[in-house]
């Protein structure tokens, strides 16, 4: 102990310090996913039912049967909320493992890792393995007709002794293959850079969408149905942001174009066709391998209706992209996957858990009440005006936006006092016990199951900005209120509750929104 | 005067502890499980548990103490599981873990060997004191013992370590 002066120093030197670079969002996501596994009362009722049965072998058998049944229910419920963390199907495991063995031989942890779902969108799943040094392999697989697919591995960087993830928008070669006439949706994937926690997509016309992030910074971005046509036509910029909202990295991503592949590219019977939707497109540049695997490039004309067909044999075409009249690249580079290969991918998806994921979702939604609830943020822009008549005038509620994500809702609105006197605004905590009076306040409500279908209200817990205690004549409050209830996952139709205002009481909107 | 005792922790409070204390939490977990990567996972899992059970935080002590207890328990569980599955690191891996640099390898091995011979509670209290700089009260919260016991345990650990290390020197 020559240069360590004390016990404390000795212990201190034993385990080196760690950085504070964490991932809080992952914790919240995982906690919420676990929360949503099964309603507590359901699991509780199974336990109490079991307790009433006899003892001994019979009980153990019943217990086992229930455990298996509960496992099935729990499994499907998890899938309905999120598939993140679920193991990849065998085929995906195998392809990722094969690459990891070659590329990451010095990282036994990565080679042995089980590929899992690391991000997902409505129609595509990203499977992957990764380590803390930033190395990873991922496979993107579409889950519907029309095939979205790509596979890649990446390496981490070491900067000043720290391993960092440089961040990627790995969408420059995502295959977008038309299957049986069905075009797949535009799907982009990527991984956040170290130090960033959010991502968003910005289109040339200024449209912006937040990108949901999966585990370990991976994401799959599937533009909303409204923005799908735009995502085919114009480039988008994907930005990585720090927690404080500042931008760290902006990358332009070129739009993929749908391509149909028949046969094996490069053989006499092969046909490759597609449709170009990009503005300013002039030709298709084809990258091919000629004799001796020498790279060749040639161009195909685009027809007046935007379609093109590649039939001639000029080497083995490996990929193509759209160019403008100055030969500048306008689309992502579309890998030309032989038909047998993409058909095997689809078979694999259908036969294993890729498509079964969507089947599980469908089944589970049915179990929860026929399609209620959505994992994905659903925003409805509305222009609803509700007028509550009170003594001396009225209170006007103007609702502009309703957002639901899983079990959370947010309502954007304004409240205006159009009466001669001041009105008080009162709210009540969500869990206030019901007594003789059951006051209602701002929130959302569904119709209860009993004969007269009473409203069951979920009161808001958060107001932004803070709701004033009162509104003077002519005065308005504009903001949002939000709350959380598992019932959003179970019930389709919802009403908005306003108030309570004094004088006046609460007011229920006569319009409904559905989850 | 009525004293309002807050029940449940908020996400903001937990996030604040996470962001402020993550490095120390990981370091203590690493000292328990002997694996830096596993320590990061342990802390992450512990916070998932904390978020899920935040409503059960009674508010009678400091939130940070409650979090420390969850992390320490998670690390001990992970260590026990590793022993059960016989995936505890071999001596080479331990040397890599404890002494990534060539410098001081012998000394650190001696310290590690000495610490390994301490009873578990003494080790834990020592880690919390040295790596997290927790005061006696916070250590008491984290380990579930009284302040006085913390002081006595820490003193006993230091005395025992001094003896063990002097044996090594001889």
Image (cartoon, rainbow, N blue to C red):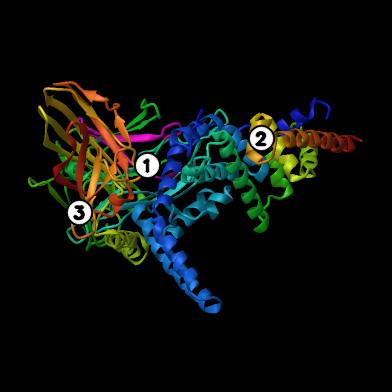
Residue located farthest toward the bottom when viewing the structure as drawn:
A58
Pick the residue in front: A431 or A213. A431
Q: Which residue is mark 1?
A: A213
Packing grade of label 3 (10 A; few <14, some 14-19, many >=20) is some
| Numbered disc in front, either 2 or 3 | 2
Q: For the residue carrying disc 2, how many other residues have a C-alpha within 10 Å: few (<14), some (14-19), or many (20+)?
A: many
Q: Quadrant of the N terminus of chain A?
A: top right
Task: Name the spot of residue A70 as percent of width and height, x first.
Answer: 43, 65
Q: Which residues are magenta?
A: A193-216
Q: Does A219 appear above or below A503?
A: below
Q: Say which element carries label 1.
A: loop
Relative to A403, A105 lies left or right: right
Q: Is residue A105 visible?
A: no
Please determine whether, in this image, residue A241 is positioned above or below residue A259.
above
Q: Residue at x 39, y 63 (%)?
A: A73
Q: Which mark is residue A75?
A: none
Which element carries disc 3, helix, strand or loop? loop
Residue appearing at x 63%, y 38% in the figure: B142
Q: Residue A372 sits in which quadrant?
A: bottom left
Horizontal side of residue A474 vs A174, given as left or right: left
């Amino acid at each position: 102990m020559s240069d360590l002066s004390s016990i404390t120093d000795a212990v201190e030197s034993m385990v080196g310090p760690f950085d504070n670079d964490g991932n809080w969002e992952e914790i919240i996501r995982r906690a919420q996913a676990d929360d949503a596994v099964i309603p507590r009362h359901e699991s509780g009722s199974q336990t109490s039912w079991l307790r009433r049965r006899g003892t001994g072998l019979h009980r153990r058998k019943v217990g086992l049967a229930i455990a298996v049944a509960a496992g099935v229910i729990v499994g499907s419920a998890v899938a309905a909320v999120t598939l993140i963390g679920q193991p990849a199907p065998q085929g995906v495991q195998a392809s990722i493992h094969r690459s990891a063995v070659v590329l990451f031989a010095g990282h036994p942890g990565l080679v042995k890792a089980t590929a899992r779902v690391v991000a997902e969108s409505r129609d595509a799943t990203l499977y992957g393995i990764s380590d803390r040094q930033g190395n990873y392999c991922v496979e993107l697989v579409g889950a519907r007709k029309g095939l979205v697919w790509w596979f890649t591995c990446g390496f981490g960087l070491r900067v000043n002794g720290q391993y960092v993830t440089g961040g990627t928008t790995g969408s420059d070669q995502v295959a977008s293959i038309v299957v049986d006439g069905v075009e797949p949706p535009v799907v982009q994937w990527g991984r956040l850079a170290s130090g960033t926690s959010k991502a968003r997509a910005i289109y040339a016309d200024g449209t912006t969408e937040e990108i949901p992030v999966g585990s370990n910074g991976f994401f799959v971005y599937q533009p909303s149905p409204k923005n799908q046509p735009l995502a085919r036509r114009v480039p988008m910029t994907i930005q990585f942001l720090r927690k404080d909202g500042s931008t760290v990295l902006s990358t332009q991503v070129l739009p993929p174009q749908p391509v149909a592949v028949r046969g094996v590219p490069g053989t006499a019977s092969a046909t490759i066709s597609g449709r170009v939707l990009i503005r300013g497109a002039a030709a298709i540049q084809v990258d091919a391998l000629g004799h001796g695997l020498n790279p060749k490039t040639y161009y195909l004309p685009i027809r007046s209706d935007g379609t093109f067909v590649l039939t001639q044999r000029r080497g083995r075409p490996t990929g193509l992209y759209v160019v403008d009249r100055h030969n500048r690249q306008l689309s992502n580079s579309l890998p030309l996957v032989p038909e047998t290969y993409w058909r095997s991918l689809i078979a694999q998806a259908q036969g294993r858990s890729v498509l079964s994921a969507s089947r599980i979702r469908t089944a589970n939604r049915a179990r929860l009440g026929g399609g209620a609830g959505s994992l994905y943020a659903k925003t409805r822009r509305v222009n609803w005006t509700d007028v509550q008549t009170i003594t001396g005038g009225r209170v006007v509620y103007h609702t502009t936006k309703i957002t639901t994500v899983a079990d959370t809702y947010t309502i954007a609105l304004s409240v205006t006092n159009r009466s001669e006197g001041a009105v008080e605004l009162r709210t009540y905590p969500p869990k206030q016990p019901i007594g003789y009076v059951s006051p209602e306040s701002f929130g959302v409500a569904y119709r209860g199951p009993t004969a007269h279908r009473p409203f069951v209200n979920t009161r808001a817990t958060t107001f932004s900005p803070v709701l004033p205690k009162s509104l003077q004549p002519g005065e308005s409050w504009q903001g949002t209120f939000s709350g959380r209830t598992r019932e959003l996952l179970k019930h389709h139709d919802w009403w908005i509750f306003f108030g309570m205002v004094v004088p006046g009481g609460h007011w229920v909107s006569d319009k409904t929104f559905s989850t | 005067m009525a004293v309002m005792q807050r029940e449940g922790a908020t996400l903001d409070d937990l996030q604040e502890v996470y962001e402020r204390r993550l490095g120390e939490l990981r370091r203590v977990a690493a000292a328990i499980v002997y694996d830096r990567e596993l320590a990061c996972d342990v802390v992450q899992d512990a916070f998932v548990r904390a978020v899920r059970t935040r409503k059960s935080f009674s508010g009678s002590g400091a939130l940070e103490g409650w979090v420390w207890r969850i992390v320490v328990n998670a690390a001990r569980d992970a260590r026990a599981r590793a022993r059960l599955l016989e995936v505890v690191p071999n001596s080479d891996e331990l040397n890599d873990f404890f002494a990534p640099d060539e410098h001081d390898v012998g000394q650190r091995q001696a310290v590690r060997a000495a610490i390994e011979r301490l009873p578990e509670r003494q080790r834990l209290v020592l880690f919390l004191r040295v790596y997290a700089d927790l005061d006696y009260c916070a250590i008491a919260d984290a380990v579930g013992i009284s302040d006085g016991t913390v002081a006595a345990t820490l003193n006993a650990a230091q005395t025992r370590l001094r003896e063990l290390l002097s044996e090594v020197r001889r």
